[in-house]
Amino acid sequence: MKIVMAIIKPFKLEEVRDALTGIGVHGLTVTEVKGYGRQKGHTEIYRGAEYAVSFLPKLKIEVAVAGPDVDKVVAAIAGAAKTGQIGDGKIFVTSIEHAVRIRTGETDVDAL
Amino acid sequence: MKIVMAIIKPFKLEEVRDALTGIGVHGLTVTEVKGYGRQKGHTEIYRGAEYAVSFLPKLKIEVAVAGPDVDKVVAAIAGAAKTGQIGDGKIFVTSIEHAVRIRTGETDVDAL
Amino acid sequence: MKIVMAIIKPFKLEEVRDALTGIGVHGLTVTEVKGYGRQKGHTEIYRGAEYAVSFLPKLKIEVAVAGPDVDKVVAAIAGAAKTGQIGDGKIFVTSIEHAVRIRTGETDVDAL
Amino acid sequence: MMRSSLYRWGLGALALAGLAAAVIDPALAQAPAAAAPAAPKPNAGDTAFVLISAYLVLLMTIPGLALFYGGLVRTKNMLSVLTQVFVIVAVVSIIYVIYGYSLSFTSGGGLNAFTGGFSKAFLMNVDPTKTAATFSNGVVIPEYAYIIFQMTFACITPALIVGAFAERVKFSALLLFVVLWVTFIYFPMAHMVWYWAGPDAIADAAKAVAAAGSDAAAKAAAEAKLAEVKADAGLLFQWGALDFAGGTVVHISAGIAGLVGCLVIGKRIGYGKELMPPHSLVMTLIGAALLWVGWFGFNAGSNLEANGTAALAAINTFVATGAATLAWLFVEWAAKGKPSLLGAASGAVAGLVAVTPAAGFAGPMGAIILGLVSGGVCFIFCSTVKNAFGYDDTLDVFGIHCVGGIIGALGTGIVVNVALGGAGIPDYETKPGELVAGAYEFIPALWAQAKAVLFTLAFSGIGSFILFKIVDVVVGLRVTADREREGLDLAEHGERAYNL
Amino acid sequence: MMRSSLYRWGLGALALAGLAAAVIDPALAQAPAAAAPAAPKPNAGDTAFVLISAYLVLLMTIPGLALFYGGLVRTKNMLSVLTQVFVIVAVVSIIYVIYGYSLSFTSGGGLNAFTGGFSKAFLMNVDPTKTAATFSNGVVIPEYAYIIFQMTFACITPALIVGAFAERVKFSALLLFVVLWVTFIYFPMAHMVWYWAGPDAIADAAKAVAAAGSDAAAKAAAEAKLAEVKADAGLLFQWGALDFAGGTVVHISAGIAGLVGCLVIGKRIGYGKELMPPHSLVMTLIGAALLWVGWFGFNAGSNLEANGTAALAAINTFVATGAATLAWLFVEWAAKGKPSLLGAASGAVAGLVAVTPAAGFAGPMGAIILGLVSGGVCFIFCSTVKNAFGYDDTLDVFGIHCVGGIIGALGTGIVVNVALGGAGIPDYETKPGELVAGAYEFIPALWAQAKAVLFTLAFSGIGSFILFKIVDVVVGLRVTADREREGLDLAEHGERAYNL
Amino acid sequence: MMRSSLYRWGLGALALAGLAAAVIDPALAQAPAAAAPAAPKPNAGDTAFVLISAYLVLLMTIPGLALFYGGLVRTKNMLSVLTQVFVIVAVVSIIYVIYGYSLSFTSGGGLNAFTGGFSKAFLMNVDPTKTAATFSNGVVIPEYAYIIFQMTFACITPALIVGAFAERVKFSALLLFVVLWVTFIYFPMAHMVWYWAGPDAIADAAKAVAAAGSDAAAKAAAEAKLAEVKADAGLLFQWGALDFAGGTVVHISAGIAGLVGCLVIGKRIGYGKELMPPHSLVMTLIGAALLWVGWFGFNAGSNLEANGTAALAAINTFVATGAATLAWLFVEWAAKGKPSLLGAASGAVAGLVAVTPAAGFAGPMGAIILGLVSGGVCFIFCSTVKNAFGYDDTLDVFGIHCVGGIIGALGTGIVVNVALGGAGIPDYETKPGELVAGAYEFIPALWAQAKAVLFTLAFSGIGSFILFKIVDVVVGLRVTADREREGLDLAEHGERAYNL
Ligand SMILES: Nc1ncnc2c1ncn2[C@@H]1O[C@H](COP(=O)(O)OP(=O)(O)O)[C@@H](O)[C@H]1O
Ligand SMILES: Nc1ncnc2c1ncn2[C@@H]1O[C@H](COP(=O)(O)OP(=O)(O)O)[C@@H](O)[C@H]1O
Ligand SMILES: Nc1ncnc2c1ncn2[C@@H]1O[C@H](COP(=O)(O)OP(=O)(O)O)[C@@H](O)[C@H]1O
């Protein structure tokens, strides 16, 4: 099993969710995060005090999937989250060793 | 060493924390997240515009533990977070290769 | 490739970012989290109802780096985030198997 | 005129099908009691003052009270509290013009000690030229101005109650309860405390007594007439109970209803176990500040005239609040180690409550004492006493409004004393046409206040209990546990307060 | 005097270089029309009432309207809405004293049916001793009080429009549009509806007719004079259209301008696809409550005197709002399954809009009917009708202000009827010096209202269309797609609303 | 009477044990200076106006100023700012009735040029029938109304100061400082600028001079008496300095105290290094709007009568604010590239400050000029000048209140000129009983203003420095670094602002 973690632009959430549903993935967890990268931020000015804000709002999506599905999932996210402009984000894949569904106690692939 | 990451219902936090303290785990990190899964969301209506909201508030708990403790920890969380109703959440276990306590520079199991 | 995940004190963010930039790391993702650990919390009182609040605001930083850079990165974060007082936080390192830059489709080390 | 009022009545009936049609007996209709025939004209200054005071009472309700309460609940219940307060204002305003004003401020015939009648239902017989009495001889205001001012009191009082069982009450149940409560508790209370014949009627009767001179028969007749005029008043008014702006009618009656309500409905899930900190003390502060500002309308406006006594009532309102703020703050600082914003704000409201019945009767130093006492005592009630008894009065409606109201009602009997800097108990008979301070005796004055307090506790306490039980049977008072967990905003109203 | 007003004029010109210099023809300058020579003195009560009413109208605009609107947009556009409303107030206040008041409330000579002139530009010829007429014979207020009251109306009206194209309009374009719109739409509308010679001028002329007695020539002359005095009024006033506080001038004219604006500027990116829930219904509730409170200034203040009619207008404002709140709430509850806070708040505003033209003309039961109708109908417009047509009127300026305004304007023609409890159409001629209710005939009364509605829809609709097109050509109405995505707060103002 | 006031005094003493007992010399007690014996009666309109103006000043303080300031600090310090402002109001209100009013507005005997005495301590000798003078001959208001109005000024002024050292001051230190500051700086300043014998006293003395006719001795006596009456005034009043509503007393004195305070207490940790953006510009906007609305109470209310001059003051307040809003907005737009909400709101406050001393003296065009100048100059101070000097005046108390106050105070000396559309310098002597505009000479007028500005800067600047040092020694001005990092809300008050 793997966890696919993606950093995306906030307004792409619905499209990514739909893409995942389209390939049969029906669970995911989303976190509001701030990203720092190549995409340039903006300047805010408050009564003469200027702040260069370089952290931009992003969403982090985490999807646990069975090993074999991982490429399909990565491709689905990458496709749906892409605008082609700087700051589109990243996808990272990690292994998970164990999974449990709290409600039923089912484990591993059954738990997803 | 492992990281146990659990997605739980928000009002279960205190119980999970107590269960962990009960088995000697005294550190954890909590993130507010939104979950999408089998649990159905709700509808919001604002002046005739209806929104089907499928992302529900959840908490993500991350606990780093020494390898041997992992089953105990998973069991403790699963026990405390369970209501038996849909949406109780998941637990995922990942390996970590290295840990550091910033204050002292202690590493690995000493750092937890 | 690795993900370095660090829990730090919120007001240390700018210093950590500068330290990372100093060693050539130009991307990271930040999440607001609440930490529970040795650092004691505080008491809040609202009209006679006393609440012992043990979760403290922290920031979680995630940086994906190429395998060889990992020690440099851990050292940089540990150095910049340190105050020497309890609650400074932890650093955890995990492996990632795969990385993608959504905008270009570049993968793995090129994607970072 | 007859035709027009028939049309009018028809229009109202049309709008509110069926309601009240049976209860209104046109035979009861009578010339407006409040206005004398060839009477004095309203002064634009007094009219402006009363109207703007009414606006201020609305301001203290929405957004004032709504925010004060709303900031203290958890995020997931914020909108439910706001909606409750807002819709209560809407509902009660309509009821008030249909029959509330009439029940409160007309003669109730045989039941006059307890309630008014229906002679001004649908505001029949009121028009822009009609006037209402004030507390000075020869000074009147437009009756519409009096109505809107009193209407705002009827709107805020039931809204105070919702704080006691916030975060778990069903919206439909609350609406039903409020309709019943204003009808059977509030309007009668207002009548019992505030309905009277007015200064000019008393002065006229008293002058007739004086004019009767040595003619025994004439004198007896005149004296009988005077007695009759004085008896044309609500029960508590006849007892001589003083309540300048609503200590009994508003605060004690709402406060005890709240206590009864939270006992009947039960504690919130997780009460005492889960953290339930206020979700936004900023909103609570805004609310407290608007309560303070708006309360000038409430207290000084209750003078019905813009004169030196209104200004006294305003100053008293200011300094009692200041004193209670400091009392709560410093007692808390001493007892708990830190002076809190919520403490300061709660103290302010406690002071406002306590000075309400005394506003135009006390002197500024008396008002300060009332504030100091209520700030300290209410703090003890909301922390120690409430915890000891373990009831879940979510927003301390009892600990602040009922306790503060009792302190104020009893204290009024003391600080009204001219010897203590008070304004004295008004006497309209001794020098007819002039308002002078009557003789003051400590025991009778205090006893009149105590009787009024006890009566209000019993009347509103028992009455509210019955009404809560009825509502519980009819629609159920409480939401299900699931809906309570989810939060009333989503469960009851389908909305979320914040999408930041 | 001449020298001083020259200096004054010079000072103004200096401050606002160049503007208007050409258009002001000093020859037009004339004695203030509003004040009679050896005329009545203002009463402090009326003066206080009108001044405080003006403050209340400002309160309903900032923070009231700003928050009501701001809470409904997404977080990223919050400050843009607040800034738009705040700066509109600033801009229009300056324009108003420069030429807005003069264009609205002086004689426009040959164009008098449509607009005023420049005789009071820079408030020339106004000083603290000058007075303005009210609606009662022999009652006046300081002209400065009248000016500030009317100024607040001019400030809020264009601010209403911004709701229609919130979240996408360019700030510079909006400012330019507002300057043009008040100049070419609002000031003429205000003149056409509210400019007249005043009660004393009519009474004097009517008395002269009566005094002329049997002398045919004198009578003819006096009658000609009376006709002339009556003709010294705006077009819609001459038609006999009733608009107590601005149903046509304010709400219909702003509402139709909003509809035109959102059609010209186009839908928001993602409209109908992305979730766009209100970011803070708490702010919307605060705004709605302050609108309710401030609207008393608007409606009762429009009576210009603190008397029984002002109190009637205040009560009407209260109960129409209560009724509309309940209507929207219950219709929504029935139709959608849940009663919402936003529904209650929207209903309240719909009721306030509908009662605006009727405030001093209806009786309380008539006001309740207006409220019930507007609460229900506006709900249908904002949900069903809007979705059916698919235009993106962000904050329902059309569905609430235009639709509610039309209901109110037409309804005024009905509920003004004395037989239905209304106050009647004022008649200053029949008994000169006394205000009596004139004869009422259904068809003419309704037709006068309908004509006024149609005229306003056409005038403001077409006029606004032209102005939007001009602004679009000059600076471009809409921000780029990127800036719209980023949010106007950062893109246009360089700030974020919250850093929690 | 004697007995009653003794009781009263006793009651006060009891409440506030020990305080002031020594300083009050009953021998000083005298008949209330402000009220003439068989004097004019207050008008309900004026009374209503002054009372409601007082409420408005409270509204502008809480929640107005509290939110304006609170929105600008970081989340972790939000409640500390709100608590400071709220509790300052409470503290000062109590001090004011104990000795503040007396020190400000009674004769100070030998020290009369600088301070009042204790003859009205505990509001002794004040009751609802007592009156206070206004600025018109023969017009009075209830003394209680005057007291509550002035009390609100005393409450807001020290609250302005807290902005300068927000986010680091210790709460206990602040309270102590405020008590000292109002006692030793504010009450004397109010006395020096606003204490005088009143129009009727001057008119009577002037009439006596006229009546003395050719009798040299009588004339000399009468003239001596007139001189004495005119000398019964505070120092700055005697200099002829004009300050309609508090440019020197309120804004310059608070502004310079703020600057001194932030220098004494030092910069915030991380100032200039860490990001410290405002945590909620929404709260700041609400605050700014309520300041604008409430300031009408401040400025127009200072006229003490509801007449044409009050209306003028209101209009001036409106347009100066509008002009300053635009000036800051456009200058910022030009200089920084974007027009910001915070800029608009800051400009509004700068305009309100600048028009304060001029409100009833300027004409509308003069007020616009004042607004334009202050909006522009204050922007430069808050951005460029402050950054250049590097002091950490957290919320720009100096840059807005002191700088704006100086612009207003000096500008008043110019725009008061009748030739420039101003209302002129009041002259009560030339035509006794009538208020006429006196002769205007540029240099003396401006010099009187400049002297007042310099005196205020020195008096409040040096005095505040001494008081800050005393407080620092006694309790320590600043929290520890750890507590500052944690935030004052948790560290000092044990609460968090938001739990969303
Ligand atoms: N090395 C990294 N580790 C973790 N997150 C990263 C890293 N680099 C970038 N990110 C995340 O990806 C987001 C997008 O990166 P950025 O460099 O701005 O553009 P792009 O995705 O087009 O390369 C950043 O805002 C940040 O949240
Ligand atoms: N495949 C997944 N990957 C990541 N998170 C998931 C996944 N499936 C579910 N979740 C998380 O678990 C939560 C509960 O899942 P859900 O399917 O609603 O109920 P249950 O836990 O009873 O199976 C979701 O809200 C989501 O946060
Ligand atoms: N076992 C753990 N797993 C995950 N996070 C932890 C763990 N222990 C501590 N943390 C995080 O590290 C933070 C600091 O830990 P704490 O014990 O307070 O101090 P220190 O870092 O000095 O050891 C905590 O607030 C929590 O967020």
Image: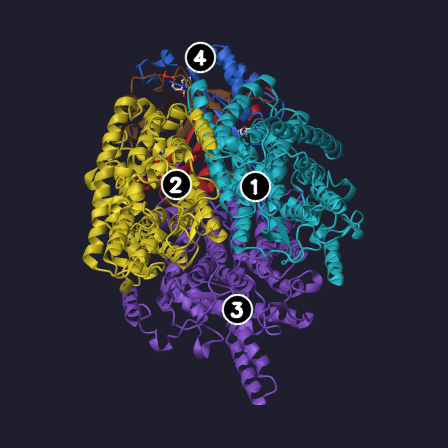
Chain colours: A blue, B brown, C red, D yellow, E cyan, F purple
Q: Nearer the viewer, residue D113 or F67?
A: D113
Where is residue D377 drawn, in percent x and y?
25, 50
Amino acid type indicated by mark 1: Val
User: What chain is tagged by disc 4?
Assistant: A
Instruction: Rate crowding at label 2 as few (under 14), some (14 to 19) or many (20 or more) other CA atoms within 10 Å.
Output: few
Amino acid type indicated by mark 4: Gly
Count of numbered circles in the view? 4
Q: Is residue E69 above or below residue E43?
A: above
Q: In the rendered image, is residue D371 in sight?
A: yes
Secondary structure under tag 4 reads helix
E124 to the left or right of D465: right
Secondary structure under tag 1 reads strand
Amino acid type indicated by mark 3: Val
Distance from disc 1 to disc 2, alpha carbons, whole Å, reads: 22 Å
Amino acid type indicated by mark 2: Ala
Quarter of the rendering containing residue E92? top right
Residue assigned mark 3 = F193
Distance from disc 4 to disc 2, alpha carbons, whole Å, reads: 88 Å
**Viewport quadrant of the N terminus of chain F:** bottom left
Secondary structure under tag 2 reads loop
Q: Are marks 1 and 4 on the same chain?
A: no
**Viewport quadrant of the C terminus of chain F:** top left
Residue assigned mark 4 = A67
Residue assigned mark 2 = D31
Outermost residue toward the bottom in this view: F217
Where is residue D42 drawn, in percent x and y?
47, 50
Viewer-side label of 3, 4: 3
Residue assigned mark 1 = E436
User: What chain is tagged by disc 2?
Assistant: D
